[in-house]
Image: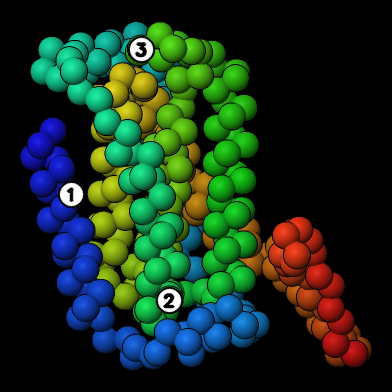
Amino acid sequence: MKKLIVALFCIVSLGAQAQVTDTTTKKNLGDTIKKDLFTAPDSVKHLHSKAWTLVPPAALIGYGALSFAIHPLRRVDYYISGEIKKTDPNFDTRAESYFLFTPIVMVYGLNLIGVEGKNRFIDRTALLGLSGGLVGLSGLVTKKLTHRLRPNGKDYLSFPSGHTAAAFMGAEYLAQEYSDKSPVYTIVGYSFAVATGVFRMYNRDHWFSDVVAGAGLGILSTKTAYLIYPYLRNALTHTDKKGRSTMILPIYQNGAPGVSFAMNL
């Protein structure tokens, strides 16, 4: 486990180096914030997600689902859990509760210092919200339906791993926005996601198949969001035959969320 932590810090240092050597022109913080927050996006940038890219994460979810019916897969869960108890019986950390947010924080932090991703604030926030909604709703429903007992016996909400799903959702979100800048950003994001899943098993909160399915769910949710978002955005922001354009955007004012509607005649 110590080797895993050391390796993670090494990867993070590579990410910092990638940021330093990025060839993107840096601007002062004030101009960056104005451009990012207050400039309406013209269009959603070219997206990485294609329909066939949904297959690998779906396969991960499938592995987790099959562990309910195929006994050899379930025995893998018991074996890995048993080995963890032997080698690290007193392991206890909540670092994964912070790791799962790291890739998302990186996306907004990189934009603030002038390293621009694919999308501006409005679009990338909508994409994050859509991804989070998909992973949260599907994960909660699945936990209730599968009713699997956790390794620590705490409750029957083991499958899939919600922490792992959120971490991989964030990792894929970082990859979608920044993989064109450098592959190191993707490596950093997914390293934090993998560490989150490992820690969930070492804390005896989840079985191996829970973590595998959670990883697939997180990746699939983000990829799906990036696939369908352009269609949703076009439905909310469009120009009709008479040249009139409409726009519906989320707003937050005086402590209350809402929706704004604008039409350009």
| Res 8 label | 1
Badge count? 3
Q: Which amino acid does label 2 sit on?
A: Leu
The dot on residue 181 is none
* Quarter placement of the N terminus: top left
- The residue depicted at 56 percent of the width and 48 percent of the height is 132
Tell me residue 2's x, y (percent).
10, 37
Secondary element at tag 2: helix
Q: Could you say whether the residue bearing mark 3 is in a helix, strand or loop?
A: loop
Res. 20 image quadrant? bottom left
- Amino acid of disc 1: Leu
Q: Residues within 10 Å of mark 1 (few under 14, many from 20)?
A: some
**Amino acid at circle 3:** Asn
Q: Dividing the picture into quarters, in which one does residue 142 lie? A: top right
Please identify, in this view, whether the residue under mark 1 or under mark 2 is nearer the observer. Answer: 2
- Rendered position, 69 above or below 62: above
Label 1 close to label 2 by CB (< 8 Å): no
- Give residue 112's mark: 2
